[in-house]
Amino acid sequence: APPLPPPPEAGSPLGRPLRRREDRRLLTGEGRFTEDIASPPGCLHAVFLRSPHAHAGIGAIDAAAARALPGVAAVLTGRDLAALVAPLRMAPPIEGLQPMEMPVLPVEAARFVGDPVALVLAETRVAAEDAAELVGIAWDPLPAIASVADAAAPEAALVDPALPSNRVSLQTFATPGLEAAFARADRVVQARFGQQRQTHAPMEPRSALALWDNGRQHLTMQVGTQAPHPYRSALAVRLGLKEWQVTVESPEMGGGFGQKIIPLREDLCIAAAARLLRRPVRWRETRGENLTAVLHAREEVVTTRAAVAADGRILGLTCAIDADFGAWSFFPANYMARVVAMILPGPYRIRDYGYEVSVWLTNKCPSGPMRAPMAITSWVMEGTMDAIARALGLDPLEVRRCNSLTEADLPWITATGERYDAVTPLATLEAVAEQLGYAALRAEQAARGPAAETLLGIGLCTVVESNTYSSAFYRAAGIPGSGHEVASLRIEPSGAVIASCGLMGSGQGYDTTLAQAAAAGLGAAVEEVQVQIGNSDTAPYGMGSRGARGATAGGGALYLAGLKLKAKLLAIAAAMLDLNSADALELRDGVVLRRLAEGWAETGLTLAQLARTAHLDPLRLPPGLEPGLHQILAYDPPGTTYTNSTHACAVEVERATGTVRILRYMAAEDCGTRINPMVVAGQTHGATAMGLSGALLEHAAYGTDGQALAGSFMDYAIARADDLPAFELSHHDTPNPRTPAGIKGMSEGGTMGGIGALMNAVNDALAQVGARLEAQPATPARVWAALRGAADP
Ligand code: MCN
């Protein structure tokens, strides 16, 4: 790859903590979300009838009474929709992965509580809800598989009868020296980590409006989506349309967290219904549906075995992962669980490594990507470090120090072949240890002693966050797609700049940060740059927002497009100034400067004048330059980008009640060049809050019969402000030499660090009395039970 330009110098729009432009409209209630769009004339409202059973055959469906209700336009079943929407077939060429097919609505059997089995369309939402209650289904309840243990039992019924077993994916890996590493170890330390099922819980549940123009044979979907172009392609393919027959317009989005990437079953159903009935159709998900029937994530159990020397050095490591993916492996099952295994060794010098990753199907809500699909990883690795320290009687900080990668190790190629550039895990570890006053806190812990009413716990968690996944990663993981992003920059005759790409935000502050990235490349004033994204027809085809790729891939593409367009602008400036070359010219803040022996001088030309010339006076352009100012550029990152951080947490565990109180929380992070430090801090707060919320409270629980138990925020507890600490953040801005302007992504690492720091702190407290919490969440009841030595509930 050609060498990339160096990070910009001081005075650049990069690195400025500009306030988010979008906040004014969002905070004053003027943001326009899908539900703010008025219903067009003739609009129908969609309601889905869902399975109350974890597993049941679908017998006769009697919709006569529902259809007879005033205002009801149609009741569609799986059979009706099968003729309109192609099933999703997931069959990437990956060894150990079973191909699966998913009909838009099930015809033979419902596979989980909430599985949609019929679609009711009526003039009003109330009429549709009433009609749904009148649809009679002859259910044939069947035994349900509610856990990995059930799924793996020798005589287990099959969740998907088309598959040979409930293990939908099995992947293994081992370095050649692994066995020898265990043979020469002084000790083998084993640890187990469990994570409960969770869900995204965006503030805005899903919502969509489908408009079919029968004259033009054109579908417009107004829907909050993180990836307008892949969404449009998937919708078009499954409805048998060309992409030019579909426009996707994403209004404002109240959170996505991975739930709003591609069209899910409800989106496909309402689009098909709009086309069939030639009427607009809108659908709004209820909170209960969002909690139980969209996508879940995170349910996995990981066991590690570390071969260690007596001084704490890790000689070899293995992990076994069993992930419960629910009823469908709709997203490539291997991807999410595999990322955990891939990056598990994290910041440590572990040359010999092996993993076995099993993904199981059960009769629960299907799993999909959720902010930090590899969320458990850092807890597993850092919990293993603590287990090693305990087994060998060493200090946990010392064990980390002696295994940590240092600058001299870089670039580091991990055991699985991943390349780390410019990571600084030892620096972030030392920074938080100092800020926390680690030694003093350990002394205080010892002074309190295990008999105290409140036990003090210290948790450390260094994170290596994989992000901005490259095309090579997607291929290896079997995910159809690419890691590149496309930027479009247009400069209008007045000098106004329109920046666009295939990302779509759900709270990341793109109006501000993408404008900063484009302005930095271009040399324009940030205020002159407007970001226009979210419309599949006007934005260039890109891969969307996921995997913390927005800053590096999207911002990087805009930065590089800016540099390219700047070269054209400077060539025009040279011609206008009667210079032979543009070599001594520079554009900063929209003003053309000329380099002198000492410093810079203004030339009197501005970006606006250059723009006017390019558009309206093309005869003044130097030979060979086209009129106009438009740059489209695709940027494909050279490899996955890695960002590191260390989270540290001090907790108090009350012995009488099991209550965990966070005393202090800090994180030191290195995401390279920060486009906007305030946005980075906000993303770290949000990501860490999500991690802590999962580690402390959340649980998408099921009964042993597969019944969903958490259908409202009364049962699915997410953290409130008073559950969370103040975050003390610090930064190490080490640019990545292989990305534009040295930017690294960062918005998932906080989730990983939050879980690890909190769980390690709780277990550090419990270890003083010989207890351990093997699985999240650390609710008072579970901590109390662990303290009592009872089985982990
Ligand atoms: N940023 C920066 N400098 C850096 C890195 C990031 O200024 N060195 C800024 C970026 O410009 C961007 C934001 O921080 O505005 C996040 O950047 P990045 O880490 O690249 O992540 P993405 O833009 O790809 O956003 C996706 C990421 C993911 S994967 C989930 S899930 C997630 C998240 O962002 N969902 C969110 N943050 C969220 N925040 C909100 N409010 N809502 C969600 O649904």
Image (cartoon, grey):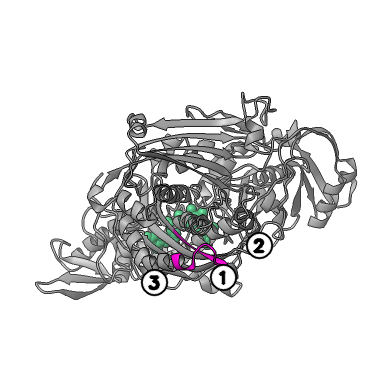
Label 3 to label 2: alpha-carbon separation: 33 Å
Residue 187 in sight in this render: yes
- The numbered disc on residue 17 is 3
Residue 167: image x %, image y %?
58, 30
Q: What's under tag 3, amino acid-wise? A: Pro
| Mark in the foreground, 3 or 2 | 3
2 or 1: tag closer to the N-terminus: 1
According to the picture, the residue beneath numbered tag 1 turns out to be 26
Q: What's under tag 1, amino acid-wise? A: Leu
Q: Is residue 457 magenta?
A: yes
Residue closest to the eye, 695 or 83? 695
Residue 766: image x %, image y %?
53, 57
Going by the image, does 333 lie left or right of 123? left
Q: Is residue 771 magenta?
A: no
Residue closest to the eye, 596 or 259? 259
State the extent of the magenta-drawn residues as a range. 446-459
- The numbered disc on residue 37 is 2
What residue is rendered at 28% in x and 50% in y?
Answer: 738
The residue carrying mark 3 has its beta carbon less than 8 Å from ligand 1: no
Q: What's under tag 2, amino acid-wise? A: Ile
Density class for disc 3 (Cα within 10 Å; few <14, some 14-19, many ≥20) is some
Going by the image, does 236 lie left or right of 641? right
